[in-house]
Amino acid sequence: MASWQGRVDPEPDSARWHQRILPWRAGSVPGVVLVGFACDEGVLRNKGRVGAAAGPLAIRKALASLAWHQQRPVYDAGDITCPDGDLESAQARLAVRVSEVLAEGHQPIVLGGGHEVAYGSWTGLATYMGSGGVVPRIGIVNFDAHFDLRDPANGPSSGTPFAQIAAQCTMRGWPFHYACLGISRASNTQALFARAAALGVWVREDHEIRESTLPQIATELDAFVAECDVLYLTLDIDVLPAAEAPGVSAPAAHGVSLPLLEPLLARLCKSGKLRVIDLAELNPSHDIDGRTARTAARLIHRLSLMS
C-alpha cells in the first residue's frame, strides 16, 4: 500500500483515491478489487520493448491523487509477479486470484503488465463461471492494435493469449466469442487476419472507428454482447495513438483516440454483464511526463465508476 500517497485537501468532501483505498482481505464488503500483474515476460518472449512489469506501480501512483467519487469500496490485492521467468506459473496464480475475487462478489480490475495478462484474467473468469456446471458464453472484448492470436506452439507470450483461450474453449466444448476493436492492418500479418476469420472474430480496424461510425459500431457491439452471458474486457493501451499513449510496448502510428473509446466502454459497462477488466502494456520506461500512466488511470477511474 506504500504507493498510495498524494495530496490532501483541507475542504470537506475532498477525498482522493489514496485516502480511501483499502487492502483487500478475504470477506471484505463487495466492491472493486485492483490486482497487479507485474510481469512482462510475455513481451520479452514476443521480442517487444520490455518495461511493462512496472506498469501496475505507475498506474497506482497516477490513480492515487485522483478525486474520489466511488459509491462502493475499492481494494488493492497487491501484485502477481514473475521474477523467475516462469510466465505460465504467474498466469496460473493470477487466475486463482481473479477467481477468488469473483467468488466474493467483487469486480476485479487487473493492472498489467504485458498482454499475457489476458490468459490469466480469462482463466480466472472461466474457473469461476465453469464451477456452476453450465457451459458459459464468455464474451471477450479487446481494444487493441493487435489480434494477439499468434501460434503458441513455441510457448506463450504477449502475442498468443487469445489463441490460447480459443484452444481452451475448444478443449472444454465452449463457444469462443472474441471481438477485437482498433486493429492495425499494418501491424498484423495476413496469416493473423486469416486466423481471426477462421475463429469468427468480430473485427473493427483502427481507421474504421470514427465519430461518424460510432452509432453503427455501437449497434454491432450490442449484438455481440447479446450473444454472451458475461463479458471480459481487456484494454491494450497501445490501441491509443502514440501521441496519447507513448509509454507502451508497441506504439501505434494511427490508433483510436480516447474520446472514441469511452462511449463504447460505457456501453459495455451498462450491459450489466461485465465481470473482469484488465489493462495491459503500459511501459513506464518509455512514457513521457507520465502521460500514458495518467491516461490509464483515467480509464480505470471511469471503468470503476461505471462497471
Image (spheres, rainbow, N blue to C red):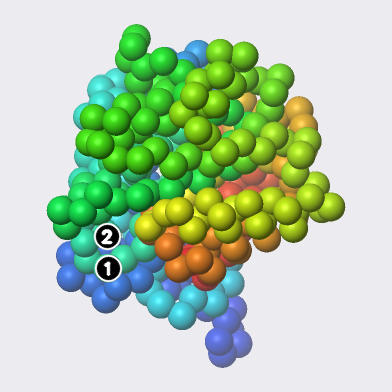
- Number of the label disc, if any, that sits on residue 102: 2
Residue 180, quarter of the rendered image: top right
Which of the two residues, 133 or 123, is positioned nearer the viewer here? Answer: 133
**How far across and how far down the image is residue 133, in percent?**
15, 53
Q: Residue at x 79, y 50 (%)?
A: 213
Q: In the rendered image, which residue does mark 1 sit on?
A: 105
Residue 256 visible from this viewpoint: yes
- Estimate how packed mark 1 is, as few (under 14), some (14 to 19) or many (20 or more) residues with alpha carbons within 10 Å: some
Secondary element at tag 2: helix
Amino acid at the residue labelled 1: Gly
Residue closest to the eye, 109 or 36: 109
- Amino acid identity at mark 2: Leu
Report the residue at 17% width, 57% height from top. 132
Q: Are marks 2 and 1 in contact (CB under 8 Å)?
A: yes
Question: For the N terminus, which image quadrant?
Answer: bottom left
Name the residue located 58 percent from the left edge and 72 percent from the top edge. Answer: 67
| Residue 301 in view | no
Q: Position of residue 118 (x, y in %)?
A: 40, 38
Which residue in the rendered view is the most extreme toward the right?
A: 212
